[in-house]
Image (cartoon, grey):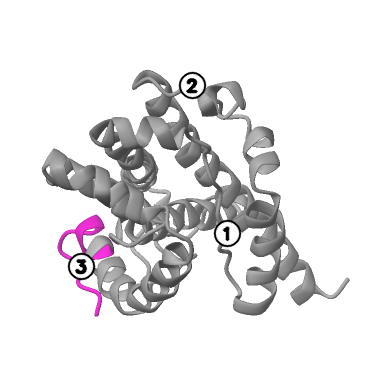
Amino acid sequence: MPLESLHVLVLGIGWYIVLLASATFHEAAHALAAYKLGDKTAYHGGQVSLNPIPHIRQQPIGMIIIPIISYLTNGWMMGWASTPYDAKWANTYPRRSALMSLAGPSANLILVLLATLMIHVGMRLGWFQAPDQIGFTRVTTVTSGQPHFMNSIAVMVSMLFTLNLILMVFNLIPLPPLDGSGMLPLFLPASVSRPYQKFLSQPGVSLIGIIVAWRLFSYLFGPILLFAINLLYPGVTYQ
């Protein structure tokens, strides 16, 4: 196998490992929140778990096929997963449903903060440094003199940071079927929350929402990523 093809394959495996772990953590957070708030649908489906198998079984296209296709065509991975829930429960308890929606992006924020901690610990130990140029796989780089495997660790940590930032920001867009739309009942009066929940379940609403959200995201994410990395490295300014 040519060296370049081997690099693409190894990088793809790294992307998939991070995507699988991040999506699983995101959906497990939804499932756990729903269980704690009175809906056991995902619990009975096995989704209150960090084992990726129940989540892959729930959404094999979004967690296997689309990640592979997006990597081969775009050079980085995208995909989706889902957590089943009781629509009657959501309509009856819109604020509980909103908290369940909030749990997923919160899980991604935790992983962004974990990557941030790993980068700062690595810098304290002299392993990592701020890169000359930033990118999805270059949020941090290794210092000179480090063993070769440290480059792979730096790339994986960079992936963990950027991919979870992507998942958090995208899911916070307040359009169906994204978590941001499900969180709105936290800020709506009860008289509006229930009709709003019924509106979200209408056919076609999710399709329109995902198309609009994806177009918005292409404008939103670049500045947000730049802002986040500038926060990561105080005193270093990327433009």
Q: Amino acid at mark 2?
A: Lys
Q: Residue 120 vs residue 191: left or right?
A: right
Q: Give percent across and percent down for residue 223.
A: 25, 74
Vertical placement of residue 48 versus 84, above or below: above
For marks 2 and 3 on the same chain, the one whose residue lies earlier in the sequence: 2
Image quadrant assignment for residue 226: bottom left
For marks 3 and 1 on the same chain, the one whose residue lies earlier in the sequence: 1
Label 3, residues with CA under 10 Å away: few <14, some 14-19, many ≥20: few
Residue 40 — which label? 2
Q: Quadrant of the C terminus?
A: bottom left
Q: CA distance from mark 3 to mark 1?
A: 32 Å
Tag 1 residue:
79
Q: CA distance from mark 2 to mark 3?
A: 47 Å
Q: Give percent across and percent down for residue 37.
A: 34, 22
Q: Give percent across and percent down for residue 25.
A: 49, 37
Q: Which residues are magenta?
A: 229-239
* Kind of element beneath mark 2: loop
Q: Residue 19 vs residue 171: left or right?
A: right
Q: CA distance from mark 2 to mark 1?
A: 25 Å
Residue contact at pointers 2 and 1, CB within 8 angstroms: no
Residue 236 — which label? 3
Q: Nearer the viewer, residue 63 or 19?
A: 63
Residue at the spot x=23%, y=59% of the render?
A: 233
